[in-house]
Amino acid sequence: MLKDAIDLNAIRRVLVIKLRHHGDVLLTSPVFNVLKNHAPHLEIDALVYQDTAEMLTLHPAIRTVHCIDKNWKALGPIGRARAEWRLASTLKAQHYDWVAHLTPHPRGAWLKRFIGAPYGVA
């Protein structure tokens, strides 16, 4: 039998990133269920676009839904950078052990690196 690459008993906090549209976010819902069923001790958070957050806010396996607001673009380069920095700092303060990046977008890879999670899956 193949051993798990990551010992989930050593993982406490997980961030699942899905930066896409409503249907794509809806299709990630089973990921949260599988993680929680396989390792009930996990504290699972999500990072999605603001306009899709409502789909996950009441999900029983999710502790917190963090959001990126697409309207940050209207803030201009400095305002957007400040908003992104606040989000990244908030995520870093959570001390995630594992980031599951489910979107082919470089933002999640940069966030994983910045927040210092030891494990990542893309």
Image: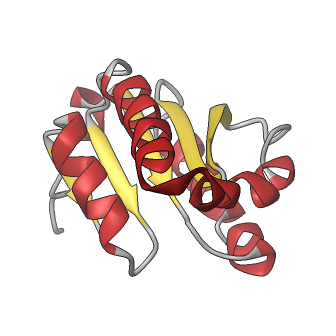
Taking depth in this image into account, of 119 and 88 the one nearest to the observer is 88
Taking depth in this image into account, of 106 and 101 the one nearest to the observer is 106
Query: Measured from the top left, where is residue 24 in percent x and y?
Result: 69, 78
Q: Which residue is pictured at 13% across the width and 40% down the height?
A: 118
Would residue 19 appear left or right of 88 to someone viewing this image?
right
Q: Which residue is pictured at 79% across the width and 73% down the height?
A: 22
**Compared to 122, does 32 lie above or below?**
above
* Image quadrant where one finds the C terminus: bottom left
In this rendering, the count of numbered labels is 0
Would residue 32 appear left or right of 38 to someone viewing this image?
right
Query: Measured from the top left, where is residue 55 in percent x and y?
Result: 85, 54
> What colouring style does the render use?
secondary structure
Query: Measured from the top left, where is residue 92 in percent x and y?
Result: 31, 27
Q: Residue furthest top?
A: 93
Q: Which residue is pictured at 48% across the width and 24% down the height?
A: 41
Query: Measured from the top left, where is residue 101 in percent x and y?
Result: 38, 63
Would residue 21 appear left or right of 112 to someone viewing this image?
right
**Compared to 44, does 41 lie above or below?**
above
Q: Which residue is pictured at 25% across the width and 49% down the height?
A: 112
Taking depth in this image into account, of 85 and 73 the one nearest to the observer is 73
* Image quadrant where one finds the N terminus: bottom left
